[in-house]
Image (cartoon, rainbow, N blue to C red):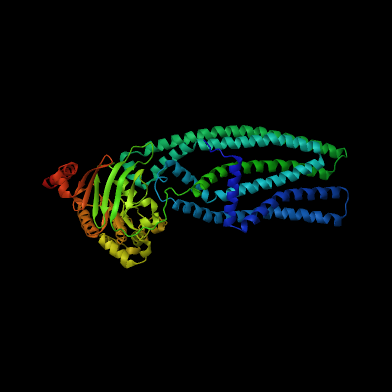
Amino acid sequence: MTPSLGAGRVLSLLVSAIGLTRSAAPAGTPLYAVLCLLGGLVPLGSAWCTKVLLDGLSAGGAWAALLPWAAGLAVTGLLSGLLPVASQYLKQRLDRAVAVVSMDRLYRAMGRLTGLARMEDPRFRDKLQLAQQTGRSGPGQLVDDGLGAAQAVVTLSGFFATLLLLNAGMAVVVLVAAVPALLAHLRLSRARARVLWSITPAERREAFYAELLSSLDAAKELRLLGLGDLFRRRMLVELSAAHAVVEGQDRRDARAHGALAGLTAAVAAGGLVWSVWLAASGSSSIGDVAMFVAAVAGVQGALQSLVHCLASAHHSVLLFHHFQEIVAQPPDLPCGAAGVPPLRSGVELRDVWFRYADDQPWVLRGVNLTIPHGQSLALVGLNGAGKSTIVKLLCRFYDPSRGAVLWDGVDLRSMSVDSLRARIGAVFQDYMRYDLTAAENIGLGDVSVMDSRDRVAAAARRAGADDVVSALPRGYDTLLSRMFFDEADRADPETGVLLSGGQWQRLALARAFLRDRRDLMILDEPSSGLDAQAEHEVHASLRRHRAGATSVLVSHRLGAVRDAGVIAVLAGGRVAELGTHDSLIALDGSYARLFRLQASGYDEVVSG
């Protein structure tokens, strides 16, 4: 279903597009408008110059009297050649200027989203994708459609007025023939818009299968499991289904356009015969005949241009509507203005309930936890127990559905999000791999010291990454990607290097260590991609790093959390057990059972 936009909303969007275009190109926009309107007057001027010249020549007029009209015809001919070139050049400049401003506005708006809820909403992501598609050229295209329609109206009005002067009866015939053509074209454009929206799901599925077939991440499984033919067939099914719907609309368009073309040709032929008969009977001049032919062609051409612009504007409005919705969206989380002072007492989760949507089950059910200042809290539990959700709440990617997260007794919702996050360092299980240099991948942990090679190298050493980075072709300046070079560069290893998963994990740790002066450190499965020896080295470094610091450690490997000050065992969205490693082992509950299970697995490996 296409969105239904009223006339008021359409006008508002057009005004917004014009405003955006003018802010991007304050001088170029009015100049482009003038050129477009001038382009609508040129055919009319050319036709009138031709009429006067023909009438003058047939009447044996003097050369001096005809010279201005000949010059006018030459000027309009020159303008008809130059105006499209100048307009196209100016339009391209406007499009580039608009792209800069619109992309800036779009991603500024995205920067106002401090949480994750909207980013995890599929409908919002669909809308964002459309906004990204239209942001570069959509506003300019909408303005271009509006000016194109205005140009067509100028031409249409001029030629219609000319027909009224020449032959009012024929003007009425042309108008009557034009009205059904206009209505039919608008109806067809709306039908095509509905068709394009109706096939969007099929096109998305087709794009999904095409991406799978060309994805490097999926290549191993596709080749090993022989899935290429399956996904290719599914892609072709979706593509064929979309094409079948479009083909049906194409047939309807062809039939309608054929009928309209026949009507147009019949009107033009009848009008031409009539005008020739009038000229032969002495009721009109040769110039009138030429002018009539030009006027009929001008009215019909302007009408087609108007319909095309209106149809394109309809599509542009729908896309620009998505862009405006993203740009105008309010912040997703209420944001207080209070600064966040250094942590003195601790962070507390007080009776925290949370679920990701009202129609989804509770992930957390009345959780009470305290992370004392200068101590470490470990979160353990089975998948889905709520560990990652607590991490998201601590970083304020979400707010609790009930209860509160407190920083030294103050609700996080009353604090500035930026100020809060400036006091938090983290390593996430799904860490980023940036297509940047090794130094930049680490330096992004704290952009204020990104240019300090000593700080970056120190963080790498603490994460055990310095030896890996130093051995790269260009050391810390080595690009960790191969995507920015052409084929000739790919043979040169110095143009870019691809790291292993474990090496990337160490860089992610180094990025976190660069934020070692933060009040709270969150470590979410920080060693998930490492081998046993590397894992031991990393956790030894983390123990030194966490000593005397406030930290939260999430890990499935219970041996890595045994030295935490407090261990919280989550089950069913609640804190099932709480204590030190020794006290929980003595309790002989779920933690002790999981610990013995993992220990027995290692014993079996060693004994085997």
In this figure, what is the number of numbered marks?
Answer: 0
Check the image and name the residue furthest to the left: 607
Indicate the quadrant where residue 235 lies. Answer: top left
**Image spot of residue 226 (x, y percent):** 33, 39
Tell me which residue sits at (73%, 44%) in the image. 157
Residue 14 placement, left or right of 238 = right
Q: Is residue 23 visible?
A: yes
Residue 494 placement, left or right of 112 = left
Tell me which residue sits at (15%, 49%) in the image. 582
Closer-to-camera residue (603/341): 341
Tell me which residue sits at (63%, 33%) in the image. 256
Check the image and name the residue furthest to the front: 409
Rendered-image quadrant of the C terminus: top left
**Image spot of residue 118 (x, y percent):** 42, 45
Residue 465 placement, left or right of 16 = left
Residue 235 placement, left or right of 553 = right
**Image spot of residue 70 (x, y percent):** 80, 54
